[in-house]
Amino acid sequence: MSTLTPRNPRELWSAFRNSPFLPATVLVFILAAGAGTFAGSYTYAMANPTPHQIPLAVVGTEGPVKRAAFVSGMEDALKTALELRNFPTYEAAVEAVEEQQVFGVIQVERHRARLNVSGAAGASVAELLSEAGPKVGARIGVPVTVRDLKPLQHGDPRGLALFYISLAAVIIGFLGAAQLSVHAAELRPWQRIGFTVAYSLLGGFAIAAVVDWLLGALDLPFVESWLILVLTMFTSGMVFTMFNTVIGRWALVPTWGVMVLIGNPSSGGAVSWPLLPSPFGAIGRWLPPGASVNAQHTAVYFGGHQHPLPFLVLATWAVVSCVVFLTWPNLITGTRAGTP
């Protein structure tokens, strides 16, 4: 009668390492860590928005004492320093709002103050300023009139729709690339890039069409918004493809970290950048989600004042990712890029 001899720990580890249980176990811990960090990153960025140096334009020299009292009262109420920029005329100050250099205009006249906010520049900042202005005016005996120079569209009263369409482009972008790596791994490198372009073109069109034409939530400059979504989706897809080329099947981990855990909370889409924690406020515009939100935001609300930086950020991430994807396997192993 034969007896089963227990295997030693080395044999047990070898069997476990070569079985599907090892990656499944690793995934259990990665998913648990991802859930916690996902909740933590968004809570850290959005649960308690705190002002950090809000840029505001100041016009006129009437009543310097009252102006100083009003500004000081606003800083006390907001618990932050206002970054004041003097302009010779109201028109010049409004142009600064259009260029997104400031979040509003303060006019303190002899017997009253006017606080001109810009909901389109940042709904959360405009809300804070609108609440604080009248209270400060009542405290120092100066009537305060609040006006929104650039209100948000009626279908997007909280200014979140642009954040959500950019988020959709980011997530579908890298999920599409992940599916190509699984279901179409035999594609050659340029074919992989070509199909990434294809689903980005179609997916970006679908997002813009649903939000604008079907739901009517936003009145988009359709072609410009569509192309921004295409560039966002393509960049996100190629970022995953780059990581997939470098580290293989665990590529979703760094992609999720860069694009979702850090990129989306720091994008300024849900909470304006002056209210974000300092690290997020500093890095958000240099990551694809922040660049996408900024480009889309300017296209919708500040037409004719588009800036090149968001497009340069997206293009740089896309080009670097493509170059790594095309050259890394040859540099490391001498094999054809894209070989699974």
Image: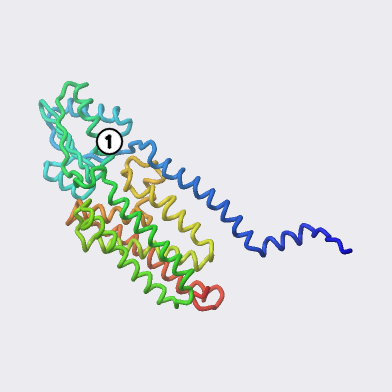
- The secondary element bearing badge 1 is classed as strand
Q: Examine the rendered structure and indicate whether residue 258 appears above or below residue 243.
A: above
Q: Examine the rendered structure and indicate whether residue 310 appears above or below residue 268.
A: below
The residue positioned farthest toward the front in the image shown: 1
Structural crowding at the residue carrying mark 1, measured as other residues with C-alpha within 10 Å and reported as few (<14), some (14–19) or many (≥20): some
Q: Residue at x 25, y 26 (%)?
A: 73
- The percent position of residue 189, horizontal first and vertical second, equals 44, 76
Between 111 and 160, the residue placed more toward the observer is 160
In this rendering, position of residue 240 left or right of residue 115: right
Between 180 and 58, the residue placed more toward the observer is 180
In this rendering, position of residue 279 left or right of residue 105: right
- What number of labels is visible? 1
Q: Residue at x 49, y 46 (%)?
A: 37
Q: Residue at x 21, y 47 (%)?
A: 155
Q: Examine the rendered structure and indicate whether residue 180 appears above or below residue 75.
A: below
- The percent position of residue 280, horizontal first and vertical second, equals 39, 46
Q: Residue at x 11, y 30 (%)?
A: 109
In this rendering, position of residue 305 left or right of residue 334: left
- The percent position of residue 82, horizontal first and vertical second, equals 27, 36
Q: Amino acid at mark 1?
A: Leu
Instruction: Work out which quarter of the rendered image holds the N terminus and state it.
Output: bottom right
Q: Quadrant of residue 187?
A: bottom left
Between 116 and 10, the residue placed more toward the observer is 10
**Which residue corresponds to mark 1?**
82
